[in-house]
Image (cartoon, helix red, strand yellow):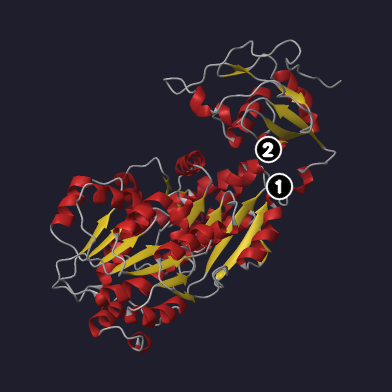
Amino acid sequence: MEKFQQLGLPQEVTRAIQSMGFTEPTSIQERAIPILMENESDVIALAQTGTGKTAAFGLPLISHIDPSSKNVAGLILCPTRELCLQITKDLQNFAANSPNIKITAIYGGANIVQQMRDLKRGTHIIVATPGRMVDMLNRGAVSVENLEVVVLDEADEMLNMGFKDELDTILKTTPREKKTWLFSATMPKEVARIAKTYMNNPIQIEGDRANQSNINITHTYSVVRNTEKYTLLRRIIDANPDLFAIVFCRTRRDTKEIAEKLIQDGYQADALHGDLSQAQREMVMGRYRNRSLKLLIATDVAARGLDVDDVSHVIHYQLPDEAENYTHRSGRTARAGKSGESIALLTTKDKGKLRIFEKAAGIQWKEYQIPEPKDIVQSKIIDKLEVLKNTPTHPEIELILNSMSGDFAQWDVRSLLSKVMTVEFNRLFEYYKNEKGIQAGGDNFGSGNKNVTKLFVNLGKFDRISEVQLVEFLASMAGVPQGDFVFTSMRNSYSFVEVKNPSVNKLVKACVGVFHGDRPVVVEVREESQSFDKGRKRKPMKERASGGGGFKRSRNKFSDSTKRRVHRKG
């Protein structure tokens, strides 16, 4: 705490952060706070998510506020509702010993009339998402003519999310003599343009290297077949009894699908994605923060700005395209000096990203050792024994057991414990007894493997079917194991799968005359290099959606010259 006092913060602020458990400043706090306390220069601060940025700008901002003033003195702009609410909560904690300082959150998805009332009652600091702030300015609900400080938090992400015009509108409205504090993980061209246009000779500071991943995070990966990802996810969950994790997916649909499967399988999980209302999002996050949920399945955008303590694992069900997004995801664990693990579930085609991410994000990858079922069950038993060992016996239970001593006379302690553990973990035993196993490495079924045949399937993303659902559909039609399939690629209107040779003929024959919805299914041996869409292009989904959300297709879509024929081996 002595180091915080040396940064020039007033006593009431240092007392507040001491009660919050702050001990030593992070690198960005140590470098930014003294400069921002002077309040004489515009500042650009480069720092990753999870490095204490909110305190780096929030503590000086709270310190500069005059509670006797009736004007809005500070405006903080951030990309998402979740981050807006988190910053507001943190600022309120920083101002715990200055109760007359008023802070108001302004964000989309909430009642705008109520937010206008909150502004009318007066506030010193507004924390806002760009779109809702523009709404307030257009309605004349807020005056920023006396603004002293504008903070742009996660400026790169605001621009990535398309808020360029909103930021320009807001910044043009603010007074010239204000100070601008810009915080960003990276400095792309658009962020540099904002700085050049709206900032005056800014001082640039950096926390620990902006592209450096947290050194307390262990980065592991496992290469498996796409159809085995969910099986691997379950093994990771089962092997870590204390797991408290975020699972990242690329799309809302995948997020919903994985969350629903986990819930059906008895896990404490829920999804966070853009289709949820604000009330639903807050309910999910409330359950996750109080640990009623152990697994949060989220998209990148939905999880932006989440600040949850003690996340033990970040699991990448699908890798992002950019190393920067990988770093943002992984930064949800290993906060406040704690350790954490980031696990990437890859298919063979994803392996090329490992070296790119390693160089761009300063990662040292390790191969994840897939736990064996017997080890998983053993870890569950050991964890349960630890719980039993540390649980005091309830006196009422003692009385009941004493009265039933004759009922237990037939068993010794070990036999009784064995039966209790069997009842406790019977579902787990049954699952792993029937589980087909995981083919680690994925290479046995990659391109060029002589034991598999590549098949073309005329179903793709436009058919509103996922990779997992497509494999399930084909396997059920042909009566072959899902383990015989290796997914290689799904496009908009078609897919390629690799299938073990013994199942190829059976699959091709079984799919003749089969329909998916109103679409005839075509499965045939064909290389990716072969042309098959010549002369036709399927319309984008939004142009093909009917009023009821379905698709209209003609069954006689192809001419004789382009009609696909099903090839049979033999």
Please name the residue that numbered disc 2 is placed on: 489
* Residue 547, horizontal then vertical, whole percent: 42, 20
Amino acid type, callout 1 = Lys
* Residue 92, horizontal then vertical, whole percent: 25, 68
**As drawn, 427 above or below 182:** above
Q: Quadrant of the C terminus?
A: top right
Q: Is residue 315 visible?
A: yes
> Callout 1: 10 Å neighbours few (<14), some, many (20+)?
some
163 and 559: which is toward the camera: 163
**As drawn, 467 above or below 478:** below
- Please tell me whether mark 2 sits on a helix, a strand or a loop: strand
Amino acid type, callout 2 = Ser
* Residue 473, horizontal then vertical, whole percent: 61, 27
Give the residue drawn at x 45%, y 67%.
50
> Callout 2: 10 Å neighbours few (<14), some, many (20+)?
some
Q: Quadrant of the N terminus?
A: bottom left
Q: Kindly identify which numbered label has been placed on residue 349.
A: 1
Give the residue drawn at x 70%, y 29%.
480
Give the residue drawn at x 56%, y 68%.
213
Q: Are marks 2 and 1 in contact (CB under 8 Å)?
A: yes
Q: Kindly identify which numbered label has been placed on residue 391.
A: none
Residue 405, by quadrant, is bottom left
- Please tell me whether mark 1 sits on a helix, a strand or a loop: helix
383 and 340: which is toward the camera: 340
Q: Is residue 410 visible?
A: no
Tell me: 452 left or right of 510: right
Q: CA distance from mark 2 to mark 1?
A: 9 Å
Give the residue drawn at x 40%, y 50%.
165
Residue 457, by quadrant, is top right
